[in-house]
Image: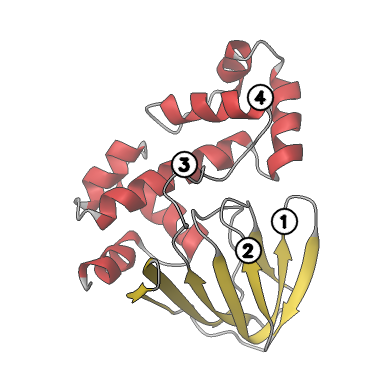
Amino acid sequence: MRIPVARTSFTVRPGGSGWVETIAGARHDWRFRPHFHAGDEIVEVLAGRARLRLPTTCREVAAGDSVVVPGGVIHRFEPVDGSGWAFISRFVPPATKNVPAGGPRDALGVQARALLGERPSLHTDVEAIAQACAVSAGHLARTFRRETGSSLHNFHVMLALHKAKALLRDRALIIDAALEAGFYDQAHLNREFVKTFGMTPAAFQAGWAAV
């Protein structure tokens, strides 16, 4: 079966506790990187089948199924077969702004996360972070992945993407959002944004600009 070119739409609407983002994806072999959201994600599969991977579990979802991914939980969706799948996802704002962002909860992971957030660019440098945490790079990488389901670099990219999204919501120029968040250039932000969210930074910003 030939899968058509991927198409998504992105809108923002008022909800009971704030603004609700909605992204709808036409049938395609969608495969997203491991990522998290500040609030809950409510996913409805419209066609086909997909696999949802969480840090310690995996499940299949099919047309007609709905699933809630709690805010802060690192997860990813991928196709089950070559026929693709279609979806609609609604992102509910967190009940409180004090909810911690996704990621580790143990002391070592929290320290590593803080160090990642302080880095001015997306050069992750696991060796330097491990040295600052007084552990070996291998131990840090294994511990972090075991707890979160994500590599250090992937998590680093996610922190930068969330920072870029906040800047885009505030109507920063895309190039400025890219550089301030630590991406090498606008094209770098665009690639990582599409890989993670299935849409471009421009589409995300346009959705918020229409509010």
Front-most of residues 160 and 191: 160
Relative horizontal placement of residue 206, taking residue 27 as reference (left or right): left
Question: Which class describes the residues within 10 Å of circle 3: few (<14), some (14-19), or many (20+)?
Answer: many
Q: Amino acid at mark 2?
A: Val
Q: Are marks 4 and 3 in contact (CB under 8 Å)?
A: no
Closer to the chain start, of discs 4 and 3, is 4
Q: Are marks 3 and 2 in contact (CB under 8 Å)?
A: no
Image quadrant assignment for residue 199: bottom left
**Would you place residue 11 above or below residue 129 in this image?**
below
Give the labeled residue for mark 1: 54
Taking the spot 76% from the left edge, 38% from the top edge, the residue there is 146
Closer to the chain start, of discs 4 and 1, is 1
Question: Which class describes the residues within 10 Å of circle 4: few (<14), some (14-19), or many (20+)?
Answer: few
Give the distance between the C-alpha atoms of the residues marked 1 and 2, in whole angstroms.
Answer: 9 Å
Quadrant where the C terminus sits is bottom left
Give the distance between the C-alpha atoms of the residues marked 4 and 3, in whole angstroms.
Answer: 18 Å
Give the labeled residue for mark 2: 69
Whether residue 81 can be seen here = no
Q: Amino acid at mark 1?
A: Leu
Q: Position of residue 129 (x, y in %)?
A: 57, 19
Front-most of residues 191 and 163: 163
Q: Are marks 1 and 2 in contact (CB under 8 Å)?
A: yes
